[in-house]
Image (spheres, coloured by chain):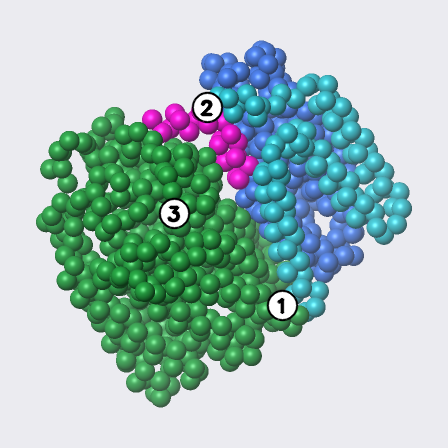
């Protein structure tokens, strides 16, 4: 990237006190921090994918590759890495950091040094989690949910892993505070709540969820650590504690966390679709209000993770009802995206392929969510592969494809290079096929009663497990093609123009990659 | 630079601090949920155990912390009015009050530990379940609150330094104002902990 | 521009007000101890929590200057407290009926 020196200096040029790697680690530039986050996220995503492939491989020949104990650790670490290290920080810390200030016409976030601090705490938390995998005692085997009382008694390195997740949560809270304050205080003249880019709106809603949900997880994890280290028995039935209360507190965070993941994903889709449909978004206000609606109602539905936990019937009915409520604003969003596509002159670029796939896969994920959100089917399907398939459709088919859409949409802006369209689309197609082969067979497996997290199973499930595992290989191939294409573009791609797509938001008005302080003079937006 | 700009935005900094306090409300909220649930499960044991707390020390500590809040508020007004020496005196007084609070707390904990009441102790584990939970909650909630007081004392110490070196001034007082918000919030948490652990006899 | 905002939104609390608030807090502390010791009724726990809320309100509105903030911040604080209350309520929909 060093060749791009014509007329201006991009933020890739070192100007500060520090050289080399320190010029990145010590930087308070939101773009540098965003790029670093993105690299770390993709690294952890790759590790998670490899662990997932290993699990799938075991399931077609149980016991031949890894033992039962190891299998428990592998699915736990797959969950912990994918959820806490990749998808929860995910879009806000990478794309949010890079584009939020630019999209509102600011030079940086409200608290740049706090921003750098969140990156350091993310690294610290990630380090603790990684140490917990290799230290004596062994990697966590509790599943990513750390359910008590097993997590209090287990011999594995739960304390370290939980401490790591606590630190990651702290990082997440501070990012939320920073973003919410930035959106309130640093909008350029003319950037109002009525014309704020939708990605920024969703980051705003996400920021509030981060702020208000993550501390509940923090205190719950502290209880786990205190239980293990000092024998405080809050969730230990032998000492009068209530393990179901752990589930309440855990899901009070971890369900809103689903919205921390999906809301900014919806934001990316709401940016990409209008640009490639060559239309304004259909129903801007509806998209905004539905984001706020999802964020607020989503806080009160955590109980639907606990229908089979022994919770009271009253609570089960209440939570099932509220769960249906949250489907309404989600449906509104889908209608708005489809409405935007109606009679539009759609341009078929790679980001649009991923965005349209998002709508399709996320709808399947959302609609199956309604099935398991209602009480009776849930009792049958809870703890089966149906759940696994459902949340992979939402998390990977939703958030994952949105990240890929965002990556292809903003890649020219972030790197200053263009990638090849053809390999991107080939990769997309293979990924799409692999994804559905891998996860749709899990819906059927779960419906037929295959429990999740099991190491072995009766022979009648073998065929579907085999199909699913083959799907995982196809999916990995698709990911490899996409990654290879972007990597080669990074080194050999032609220079990107300021606005390759015809985008309307402020990031496309400045050169690619952006100069160090984004705007030579504060932009004024007229709408 | 962006950093300097952010620093000068006093209202932005204040909002940031309030947002942080919101997260603290839910952080302590998680503990209060636990307290509420277990109290509703074991009302009689909670009632009896609270009688074992040292009401005198608890009341003194409440008065100490409330007074420290007064000193903090005065110290901030003094900075805004430009009376830096007065402010430093009151900041130091706040620190002393914070330390006194921690010392009294330590005495209370020591009394209980001496009687063998602490998490996982043989004495406590033989008691009724409601009592195990009550004392567990007592140690955890006052302990985490104590950590907050300790952090506050450290931060105010930095503010004394900043006021003396002219880093906190009449024009630029965001730092000390936000420290004050934090300190008062920690005070509010204690205002609720006090009746829950000492007064429900 | 920022400076103007600072001048307008700034509030310098007077020492006298602070001392009055402190005195009120001390009186409430004494009242709450008396209420607990006398054990007027089984509602004394609720009464004590109410007194605690009054104390917390005094600290919030005067020491923390919430009284002089814009409605925006007050509204947000209310929202946070409502969320906490709802979470407690929903948890009790399980605990009470289990």
| Residue C1's disc number | 2
Please name the color used to draw chain C. cyan
In which chain is the residue bearing label 1? A
**Which residue in the structure is indicated by mark 3?**
A197
Camera-side residue of A485 and A60: A485
Residue at mark 2 to residue at mark 1: CA–CA distance:
50 Å
Dots 3, 1 in contact, CB < 8 A: no
- Look at the image and give the residue range highlighted in magenta: B1-20
Callout 3: SS: loop
- Quarter of the image containing the N terminus of chain A? top left
Residue A202 vs C59, above or below: the answer is below
Count of numbered marks: 3
Residue A457 in percent (x, y) is at: 38, 82
In which chain is the residue bearing label 2? C
Query: Can residue C46 be seen in this snapshot?
Result: yes
Residue occupying the point 51% across, 65% down: A328
| Residue A318's disc number | 1
């Amino acid at each position: 990237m060093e060749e791009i020196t014509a007329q201006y200096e991009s933020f890739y040029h070192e100007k500060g006190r520090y050289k080399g790697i320190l010029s990145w680690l010590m930087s308070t530039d939101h773009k540098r921090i965003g790029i670093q986050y993105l690299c770390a996220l993709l690294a952890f995503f790759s590790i998670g994918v490899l662990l997932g492939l290993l699990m799938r491989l075991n399931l077609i020949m149980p016991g031949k590759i890894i033992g039962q104990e190891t299998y428990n650790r592998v699915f736990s670490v797959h969950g912990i890495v994918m959820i806490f290290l990749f998808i929860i920080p995910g879009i806000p810390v990478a794309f949010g950091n890079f584009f939020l200030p630019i999209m509102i016409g600011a030079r940086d976030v409200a608290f740049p040094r706090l921003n750098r601090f969140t990156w350091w705490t993310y690294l610290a938390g990630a380090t603790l989690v990684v140490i917990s995998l290799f230290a004596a005692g062994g990697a966590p085997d509790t599943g990513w949910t750390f359910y008590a009382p097993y997590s209090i008694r287990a011999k594995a390195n739960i304390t370290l892993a939980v401490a790591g997740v606590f630190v990651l949560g702290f990082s997440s809270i501070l990012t939320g505070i920073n973003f919410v304050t930035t959106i309130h205080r640093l909008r350029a003249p003319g950037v109002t709540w009525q014309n704020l880019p939708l990605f920024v709106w969703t980051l705003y809603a996400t920021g509030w969820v981060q702020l208000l949900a993550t501390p509940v997880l923090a205190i719950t994890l502290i209880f786990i650590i205190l239980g293990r280290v000092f024998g405080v028995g809050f969730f230990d039935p032998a000492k009068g504690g209530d393990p179901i209360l752990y589930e309440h507190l855990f899901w009070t965070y971890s369900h809103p966390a689903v919205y921390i993941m999906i809301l900014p994903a919806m934001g990316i889709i709401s940016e990409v679709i209008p640009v490639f449909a060559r239309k304004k978004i259909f129903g801007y206000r509806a998209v905004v209000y539905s984001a706020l609606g999802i964020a607020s109602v989503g806080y009160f539905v955590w109980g639907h993770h606990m229908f089979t936990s022994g919770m009271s019937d009253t609570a089960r009915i209440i939570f099932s009802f509220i769960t249906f409520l949250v489907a309404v604003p989600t449906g509104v969003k889908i209608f708005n995206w489809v409405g935007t596509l109606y009679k539009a002159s759609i341009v078929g670029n790679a980001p649009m392929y991923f965005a349209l796939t998002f709508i399709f896969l996320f709808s399947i994920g959302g609609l199956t969510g309604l099935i398991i959100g209602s009480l009776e089917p849930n009792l049958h399907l809870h703890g089966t592969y149906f759940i696994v398939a459902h949340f992979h459709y939402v998390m990977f088919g939703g958030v994952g494809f949105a990240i890929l859409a965002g990556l292809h949409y903003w890649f020219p802006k972030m790197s200053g290079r263009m990638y090849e369209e053809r390999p991107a689309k080939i990769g997309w197609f293979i990924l799409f096929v692999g994804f559905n082969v891998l996860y749709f067979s899990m819906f059927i497996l779960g419906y037929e009663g295959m429990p999740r997290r099991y190491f072995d199973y009766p022979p009648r499930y073998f065929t579907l497990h085999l199909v699913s595992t083959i799907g995982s290989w196809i999916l990995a191939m698709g990911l490899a093609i996409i990654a290879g294409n972007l990597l080669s573009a990074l080194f050999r791609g032609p220079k990107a123009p300021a606005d390759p797509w015809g985008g309307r938001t402020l990031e496309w008005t400045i050169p690619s990659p952006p100069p160090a302080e984004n705007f030579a003079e504060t932009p004024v937006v007229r709408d | 630079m962006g950093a300097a700009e952010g620093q000068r935005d006093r209202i932005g900094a204040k909002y940031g601090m309030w947002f942080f306090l919101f997260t603290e409300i839910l952080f302590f909220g998680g503990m209060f949920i636990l307290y509420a649930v277990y109290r509703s499960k074991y009302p009689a044991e909670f009632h009896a155990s609270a009688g074992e707390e040292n009401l005198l020390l608890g009341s003194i500590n409440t008065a100490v912390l409330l007074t420290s809040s007064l000193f903090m508020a005065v110290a901030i007004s003094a900075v805004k009015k430009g009376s830096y020496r007065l402010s430093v005196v009151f900041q130091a007084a706040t620190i002393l009050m914070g330390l006194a609070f921690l010392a009294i707390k330590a005495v209370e904990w020591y009394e209980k530990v001496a009687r063998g009441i602490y998490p996982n102790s043989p004495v406590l584990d033989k008691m009724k379940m409601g009592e195990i939970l009550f004392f567990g909650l007592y140690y955890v909630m006052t302990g985490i609150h104590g950590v907050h007081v300790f952090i506050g004392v450290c931060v105010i110490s930095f503010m004394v330094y900043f006021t003396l070196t002219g880093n906190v001034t009449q024009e630029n007082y965001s730092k000390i104002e936000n420290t004050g918000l934090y300190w008062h919030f920690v005070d509010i948490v204690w205002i609720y902990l006090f009746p829950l652990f000492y007064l429900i006899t | 521009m920022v400076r103007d905002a600072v001048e307008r939104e700034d509030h310098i609390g007077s020492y006298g007000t602070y001392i009055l608030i402190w005195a009120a807090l001390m009186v409430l502390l004494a009242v709450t101890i008396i209420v607990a010791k006398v054990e007027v009724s089984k509602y004394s726990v609720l009464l004590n929590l109410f007194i605690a809320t009054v104390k917390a309100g005094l600290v919030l509105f005067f020491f923390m200057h919430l009284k002089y903030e814009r409605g925006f911040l007050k509204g947000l604080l209310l929202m946070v407290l409502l969320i906490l209350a709802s979470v407690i309520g929903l948890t009790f929909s399980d605990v009470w009926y289990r």
